[in-house]
């Protein structure tokens, strides 16, 4: 595909991702060799380095989103229905997002998924372990098999799709890219 495929990429990049050109025997990367997301503790709150938002604005945001922040502190996960809520939470978690201890993704279902990195990393590894075993699976099948809530599974799958770890083989059926 290097020269005839849909995408044109440099020889250096192609040799990194192509097993035939990198000397690798197998196209299936070892799960242990894949870099895990960094592990950080999550500190909830706001600070004065908010890039244009005054402390009073942030205090109002914190009060408006107090229940969501409390839920995030306990579970390490939020699913938000509106862009307004996602913007407010992202302002409150700006420092943690910048540090890499919190990540989020807008899903194709128009919901916003926010994770503490340790929870996402754990869900990601469980999902990959399950998908490596067989055929493409649905969210409900994956969720049951690995013992995580469907919303957390859905959010993790959205991030994994964006990162290129998995593909949606058919509508609602996910497969690990080996």
Image (tube, grey):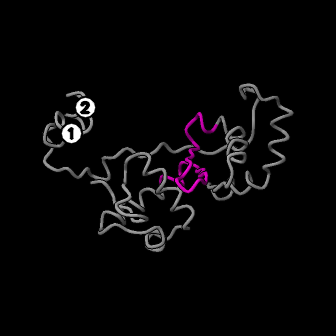
Q: Which mark is residue 127?
A: none
| Helix, strand or loop for disc 2 | loop
Q: Which image quarter is the C terminus in?
A: bottom left
| Helix, strand or loop for disc 1 | loop
Q: Residues within 10 Å of mark 2 (few under 14, many from 20)?
A: few
Q: Residues within 10 Å of mark 1 (few under 14, many from 20)?
A: few
Whether 116 is among the magenta residues is yes
Residue 71 pos. (x, y %)? 71, 57
Residue range (magenta): 96-121
Q: Which residue is mark 2?
A: 8
The residue at 80%/42% (across/down) is: 61
Q: Does 17 sit left or right of 139 as displayed?
A: left
The residue at 36%/55% (across/down) is: 167
As displayed, is residue 30 above or below residue 101?
Answer: below
Residue 169 pos. (x, y %)? 34, 60
Label 2 close to label 1 by CB (< 8 Å)? yes
Instruction: Report which quarter residue 135 is drawn in.
Output: bottom left
């Amino acid at each position: 595909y290097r020269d005839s495929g849909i995408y044109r990429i440099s020889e250096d990049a192609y040799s990194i991702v192509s097993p035939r050109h990198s000397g690798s025997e197998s196209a299936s990367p070892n799960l242990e060799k894949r870099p895990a997301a960094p592990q950080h503790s999550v500190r909830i709150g706001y600070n004065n380095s908010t890039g244009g938002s005054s402390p009073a604005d942030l205090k109002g945001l914190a009060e408006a989103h107090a229940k969501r922040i409390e839920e995030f502190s306990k579970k390490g996960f939020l699913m938000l229905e509106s862009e307004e809520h996602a913007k407010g939470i992202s302002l409150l978690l700006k420092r943690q997002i910048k540090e890499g201890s919190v990540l989020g993704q807008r899903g194709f279902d128009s919901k916003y998924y926010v994770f503490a990195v340790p929870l996402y990393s754990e869900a990601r590894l469980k999902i990959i372990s399950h998908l490596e075993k067989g055929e493409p699976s649905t969210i409900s099948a994956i969720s049951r098999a690995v013992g995580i809530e469907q919303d957390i599974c859905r959010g993790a799958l959205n991030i994994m799709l964006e990162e290129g770890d998995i593909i949606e083989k058919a509508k609602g059926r996910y497969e690990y890219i080996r």
